[in-house]
Amino acid sequence: KTQVEQSPQSLVVRQGENCVLQCNYSVTPDNHLRWFKQDTGKGLVSLTVLVDQKDKTSNGRYSATLDKDAKHSTLHITATLLDDTATYICVLIDRGSALGRLHFGAGTQLIVIP
Amino acid sequence: DMKVTQMPRYLIKRMGENVLLECGQDMSHETMYWYRQDPGLGLQLIYISYDVDSNSEGDIPKGYRVSRKKREHFSLILDSAKTNQTSVYFCASSLYRVNQDTQYFGPGTRLLVL
């Protein structure tokens, strides 16, 4: 069974600092990986998708990496803002699944303080 | 403006009552999903719908059923709700099956079953 593990579970940083969120997964050889941001009480919003065997993406202050050999992804947030306070969820897209399954991590809760 | 809507946003029911959660999307997406999100767990897939009257069970379908009579509308029904169905329920949609493109999420419905 595919599992997606995120660390840390929660993180507190000061505004302006950088932070790194981790995502490790097992199984599912053919996959893409997507990072979502979930504001409190809201739905999930896609930040970026990683596709290649060793991939890097950048979306403003968010950048992400994927290493399929290591089954590992990171999300970097540069110069954090108070609005970055949210839960960040790593999601594995199983491209081999006929049903179009997603496998969700439990999320990292990021709190940015002044 | 692409949008997934959910109604109601908050709901309190007594054990044994019936529950109807509604989801709508204005993007003519073929595929729609219902998930539940519980603390410390990733989103869990309840049901997928590939089009009108074309529904498949997800990972945790027990105690739930769905209805899709129009492409833009997908309902989740709890017949005789149980306290362990207290959760936040998310609806999502994608143009095709998710292994080809992204999912768009609604804001969620918080259900409390007493």
Image (cartoon, rainbow, N blue to C red):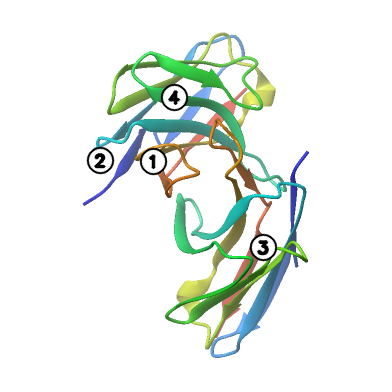
Given residues A99 and B24, the one toward you in this image is: A99
Given residues A68 and A20, the one toward you in this image is: A68
Placement of A34 over or under B70, stated as above or below: below
Residue corresponding to mark 1? B94
Please determine if labels 2 and 3 lie on a single subunit: no
Picture residue at 55% right of the left edge, 34% below the top: B35
Please determine if labels 1 and 3 lie on a single subunit: no
Q: Which mark is residue B49?
A: 4
Question: On the rendered structure, is B71 left or right of B88?
Answer: left
Q: Which mark is residue B103?
A: none
Q: Earlier in the sequence, mark 2 or mark 1?
A: 2
Placement of A19 over or under B86, stated as above or below: below
**x and y percent of residue A39 in the render?**
49, 59
In contact (CB < 8 Å): disc 2 and disc 3: no
**x and y percent of residue A11 in the render?**
69, 72
Helix, strand or loop at label 1? It is strand
Q: Amino acid at mark 2?
A: Met
Residue B15, by quadrant, is top right
Helix, strand or loop at label 2? It is loop
CA gap between label 4 and label 2 equals: 15 Å
Q: Amino acid at mark 4?
A: Ser
Q: Specify few, some or many for label 4: CA neighbours under 10 Å numbering under 14, 14-19, or 20 or more.
A: many
**x and y percent of residue A63 in the render?**
53, 77
Residue A89, by quadrant, is bottom right
Q: Earlier in the sequence, mark 4 or mark 2?
A: 2
**x and y percent of residue A102 in the render?**
59, 43
CA gap between label 1 and label 4 equals: 10 Å
Picture residue at 41% right of the left edge, 32% below the top: B32
Question: On the rendered structure, is A5 left or right of A83?
Answer: right
CA gap between label 1 and label 3 equals: 25 Å
Q: Amino acid at mark 1?
A: Ser
CA gap between label 4 and label 3 equals: 29 Å
